[in-house]
Amino acid sequence: MKYVSTRKKAVPLSASEAILQGLAPDGGLYVPETFTHIGLASINEVSSVAELAFEILNPWFEQDVMQPMLGEICMEAFNFPLGLHWHDQQQAVLELFHGPTAAFKDFGARFLASIMERLLERQGRQLTILVATSGDTGSAVASAFHNRKNVRVKVLYPRGRVSKRQELQLTCWDNNIESYAVNGTFDDCQKMVKAAFMDNNICTEHHLSSANSINLGRLLPQMVYAWYAALEMTVRTGQEPVMYIPSGNVGNSCGSYWAAASGAPIDEIRLAVNANRTIVDYLEKGIYRKRPSVDTLANAMDVGDPSNIERLFDLFPNFDDFKQAVGAMSVSDEEIQATIQRIWQEQQYVICPHTATGERLRQAWPTDKPSVVYATAHPAKFDTIVEPIIGHAIEVPPQLEQLFGTPATVRSVGTDYHEIF
Ligand SMILES: *Cc1c(COP(=O)(O)O)cnc(C)c1O
């Protein structure tokens, strides 16, 4: 299986090569040359998420140097539970937050770390990964790469601009993970990372790499839970489900579109966005215009120019096809709050602000079909938003409790990237 750039001016690569490369040299993103249809028969036999992952991902690693290790990589990466919570006979929530940092990004980050460690070992190479973060990405990447051989991670976050609990998750690491509290904004953190990548001396000396959501190694594993939900829903209800996906950089939804393109029984995919309405505007006007991002309660979705949008354009090159396949709606902060409250009152079930955009969409744009909302993070990560709405404390899951209780190590720096090397 080969991967080509969305801009079609780069040499096709194997999965492993594309994962090490990150962004294609022509500035595009790697996408599969063709979609292999995965038969349902082979999948019916599986008994764990790791086995399911192996069956689904194996064709994508056909002829790849890592194919012989794929089973082991899946066992290591998918070592936490995945499940559906049912509101009723037709409506479910896909809980993607049972990993070590309690957000769906654990799926992508853990798979990437497992495969990268083996690739680097094989090539006798070392890497330094830089991550600028305002939330979940930094903690998922730090956790996934913690104590991995041949990789160092430097996490940069804006000092005083992340919540207490977010900060604890970014600073509770040691050994090969270094946390930097930058005296500036999230944009300053991103600028430092970009400047470091432009500095040839630093790039060669430290072998810089990134682990952001455009990496193929984060996207492929995100197909696994789409398959899982589609299969479970179809078995239980006898119909293919509609998926409601809280979206920012559209990596999560792209994984689900790729799953559908390779045969997962999905009726339709609908994207919930917050006040950052770039995709909604595109669907209404037919012209894509990126915007500066605006702050919302669902801050992991505060994206004005979704980094994976090129992959969706590549999948649906014609505007009418895009419109047919990609439905999207914008959800306001007031609707997020009202939805957290409604789901708590109706179901005695607590959701995070991101998941609330998906639940709001299911209410505002309902379907007769069975449906799934992706729950992208555990609500305990957003206690300061959710607890005042539901009026009581949220129980903290053990894996987060452990992270919150680990002593912090963090260095305070200015906005000059030299300070982090
Ligand atoms: C990253 C994130 C999202 C958005 O996912 P994308 O792949 O960027 O669309 C939604 N919710 C949570 C909790 C996240 O961390």
Image: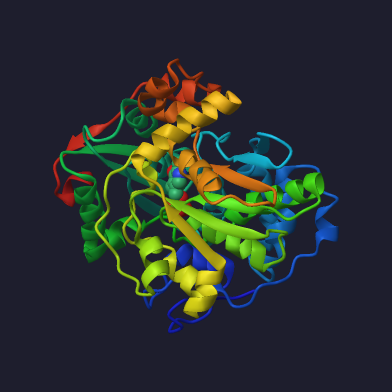
Where is residue 278? Give x, y as percent: 35, 61
Query: Looking at the image, which is closer to me, 243 or 13?
Result: 243
Farthest bottom residue in view: 9
Taking the spot 62% from the left edge, 56% from the top edge, the residue there is: 223
Taking the spot 51% from the left edge, 18% from the top edge, the residue there is: 395
Where is residue 142? Give x, y as percent: 42, 40
Query: Looking at the image, which is closer to me, 70 or 258?
Result: 258
* Res 153 seen here: yes
Query: Looking at the image, which is closer to me, 150 or 80?
Result: 80
The image's colouring method is rainbow
Query: Looking at the image, which is closer to me, 76 or 334?
Result: 334
Where is residue 12? Give x, y as percent: 53, 79
Where is residue 378? Give x, y as percent: 50, 32
Farthest top residue in view: 392
Instruction: Indicate the quadrant containing the N terminus: top left, top right, bottom left or bottom right.
Output: bottom right
Taking the spot 30% from the left edge, 69% from the top edge, the residue there is: 289
Q: Is residue 281 above or below residue 47?
A: below
Taking the spot 36% from the left edge, 52% from the top edge, the residue there is: 128
Q: Is residue 23 above or below residue 34?
A: above
Please give the count of numbered marks on the rendered protein. Answer: 0
* Res 172 seen here: no
Query: Residue 179 appears in which quarter of the rendering?
Result: top left
Image side of residue 76 versus residue 201, left or right: right
